[in-house]
Amino acid sequence: MGALPKQRTSHARQGERRAHHQLKLPQLVVCPQCKSIRRSHHACPNCGTYRGRQVFEPRTQK
């Protein structure tokens, strides 16, 4: 058998432990090429550039 707790964990202590489990919003920055919003340290999905270089060709919208 494994280790068992000697005392019950209170609701307050349980909440203190779970206080850091919330979702965080992604960091958003403005793309210097096309001025659209993109995620930080990611290639721009609109124009396909990252750090001044063309990384991929973006899909054309229909």
Image (cartoon, grey):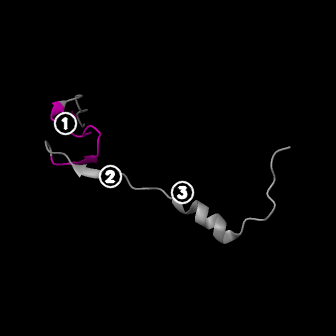
| Disc assigned to residue 27 | 2
Highlighted range, magenta:
35-53
Q: Spot the residue most to the bottom.
A: 12
Badge 2 amino acid: Gln
Q: Looking at the image, which residue is at 43% across and 56% down?
A: 24
Query: Residue 3: percent from the left, percent from the top?
Result: 80, 49
Q: Residues within 10 Å of mark 2 (few under 14, many from 20)?
A: few
Q: Residue at x 65, y 64 (%)?
A: 14
Magenta span contains residue 38: yes
Q: Residue furthest right?
A: 1
Q: Quadrant of residue 21?
A: bottom right
Q: Is residue 52 above or below residue 13?
A: above
Residues at marks 1 and 3, CA–CA distance in whole angstroms:
32 Å
Q: Which mark is first along the chain, 3 or 1?
A: 3
In the rendered structure, which amino acid carries the disc numbered 1? Arg
Label 3 residue SS: loop
- In front here: 43 or 2? 2
Residue 7 lies left or right of residue 17; in this view the side is: right
The amino acid sitting under disc 3 is His
Position of residue 24 relative to residue 13, above or below, is: above
Q: CA distance from mark 2 to mark 1?
A: 16 Å
Q: Which mark is residue 42?
A: none
Give the crowd class for mark 1: few <14, some 14-19, many >=20 residues within 10 Å. Answer: few
Residue for badge 1 = 51
Give the structural element (helix, strand or loop) at label 1.
loop
Lower position in the chain sequence, tag 2 or tag 3: 3
Does the residue at mark 1 contact the one at mark 3 (Cβ under 8 Å)? no
Residue 8 falls in image quadrant? bottom right
- Sequence order check, earlier mark of 2 and 1: 2
The residue wearing badge 3 is: 21
CA separation in Å, label 2 and label 3: 18 Å
